[in-house]
Amino acid sequence: GHWHSKLKFIILESDKGYVRSWLEWRTQLSHGEYGGLEAAQENAKRLEAEITELKEIASRDGLTGLFNRKALNDKLSELIDVSVESDSPLSLLMFDIDHFKSFNDSFGHVIGDEVIKRVSNTMQKVAREHDFPARYGGEEFTMLLPNTPIDKAIEIAREVHEGVEKLTLVRRVSKEALPKVTISLGAAMLRSDDNSESLICRADKALYQAKETGRNRIVSEMILWEGMVLVK
């Protein structure tokens, strides 16, 4: 109850140093209460496990279970450092659900939420072990693809795109079939002078181009350079 709330506050509002200080204080308190070093150590381990669990909860999107925007930002910075140090490729996909607002307006937020969950499930099925699927916000999603050049990123984008196209949505009560769901995707790969913002910006521009040229397609930043658009 009280300690769980306190822990959650610390995870969301404080840095690791404060967490360590609080744990040391709590361990000392436990030692005084229970009169034994072993009991105090066990209590500290339990609290550390709770902190780990709460960090995981705090990094996830509540609706989809995907990583959230903050976790994405943290992970992207980490992967850029790894990519630069190891001279390995890093690609990023940005995509969103086509005409989602009108879908939401026509069928309601409950079904809209179901669409978001089904798309996120498709994304998780395609993601490889070290990929990082996240909900960027609303109906927009991101996948970080470590050790992945842009041509492989396009293959993964196609898998997500085709998986979403195969989704079948039916109203539970009336069994009425709902319109097909499609997505538009943009892909970009890390350059030597990139930071998190510039990489996301280029993937977002590719996504914008996919939407401007008719939606339901994939656009690579490489294709944009050549003045062409990759359709599906």
Image (cartoon, rainbow, N blue to C red):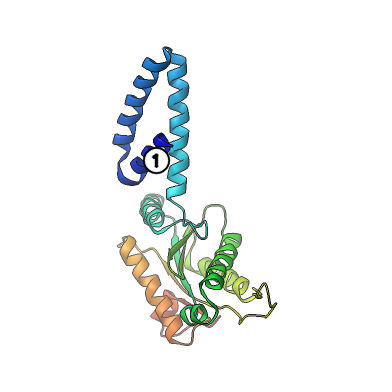
Image quadrant in which you'd find residue 120:
bottom right
- Furthest residue in direction top, as rendered: 35
Instruction: Point out the image quarter for the C terminus.
Output: bottom right
Residue placed most toward the observer, 124 or 55: 55
Residue in the picture at 44% in, 20% down:
41
168 relative to 67, above or below = below
Q: Percent position (x, y) of residue 147?
A: 48, 56
Q: Percent position (x, y) of residue 54?
A: 44, 43
Residue highlighted by disc 1: 5
- Furthest residue in direction right, as rendered: 175
Position of residue 161 in the picture relative to residue 223 (left or right): right
Q: Assign a secondary structure to mark 1.
A: helix
Instruction: Point out the image quarter for the N terminus.
Output: top left
Residue in the picture at 40% in, 79% down:
208
Position of residue 89 in the picture relative to residue 178 (left or right): left
At label 1, the amino acid type is: Ser
Tell me how many marks there are.
1
Q: Percent position (x, y) of residue 21?
A: 30, 30
Q: Percent position (x, y) of residue 133?
A: 50, 59
76 relative to 117, above or below = above
Q: Residues within 10 Å of mark 1 (few under 14, many from 20)?
A: few
Residue placed most toward the observer, 231 or 70: 70
Residue placed most toward the observer, 8 or 215: 8
